[in-house]
Amino acid sequence: MQSVFYPDERIDTRYDIKGCEVGRWTDPASTGSPVKILKDNNFEGKHIILDQKSSWLVDQVEIDTAFLRSLNVLDYSILLAHQPLHKDELDGKHSFSNLIVRTEKSMAQDSPTEEDHPTTPLLGGDSSRLESDAIDSGSDHSITCQEINLPSVNSTDAELQEFHAHHRRLLPNFKNSVHVIDGPELRYFVGIVDIFTVYGLKKRLENLWKSLRFPGRAFSTVSPSTYSQRFCRWVKDHTK
């Protein structure tokens, strides 16, 4: 949780989401831990507002849960928090210099050495994803892919294919950028955790008991296939 919610100085709300309803409510007024972690039912009526980046999050969750399903894993959660973006962050995130920094940060994730550090594919190749981040709507000086030119770096088809295969995105210029996605007004912290529960005999018996105890209701202990489908549906339904 500390890895996902970092830095946390300005985070004002935190959630632990499983995509179900039974036992998924936290009383915001309850005493105890100074940090309140809310749950699925607390989130009802709210949305993750990402605009053009929403499809990336939905697709990435589908990729991750497909992997967890292949391992026969269930009962994982998506940690979610947000903080408001300050005016200087809103004004600066579409600048050319910020775009270059974000591109280098994005491509450096899998490139520990300088000679293996391809930065052009994101600038020159993935136009749809880049334009969604680079264009400042309502501005007369928006940046498009065609205006970006880095003559010192060479793009190859293999690098472009690697970029798409890894489902990369343009990371924000921020600490812990892998877990951060900026929306129009809020900065979201997102990560999937609790990934070690296997659907063995104990969980199968728990599923049977809960089916009798909570008929017709959505509880956490279900098959990995059902769990991943429901999890993805929750993310899709609550992301705009």
Image (tube, rainbow, N blue to C red):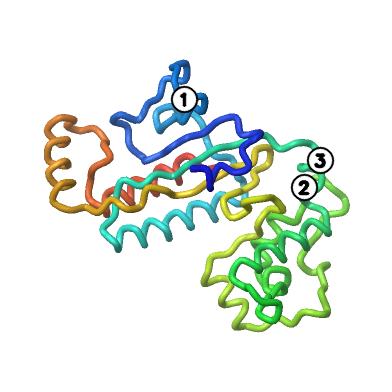
Amino acid on which the number 1 mark rests in the picture: Ser
Q: Residue tagged by mark 2?
A: 137
Q: Earlier in the sequence, mark 3 or mark 1?
A: 1
Q: Position of residue 212 (x, y in %)?
A: 12, 33
Q: Do the residues under discs 2 and 1 have CB atoms within 8 angstroms?
A: no
Amino acid on which the number 3 mark rests in the picture: Asp
Residue at 42 percent of width and 56 percent of height: 62
Amino acid on which the number 2 mark rests in the picture: Ser
Q: Residues within 10 Å of mark 2 (few under 14, many from 20)?
A: few
Q: Is residue 66 left or right of residue 182?
A: left
Q: Residue tagged by mark 1?
A: 33
Q: Residue tagged by mark 3?
A: 88
Residue at 77 percent of width and 49 percent of height: 93
Q: Residues within 10 Å of mark 3 (few under 14, many from 20)?
A: few
Of circles 3 and 2, the one toward us is: 3
Of circles 2 and 1, the one toward us is: 1
Q: Earlier in the sequence, mark 3 or mark 2?
A: 3
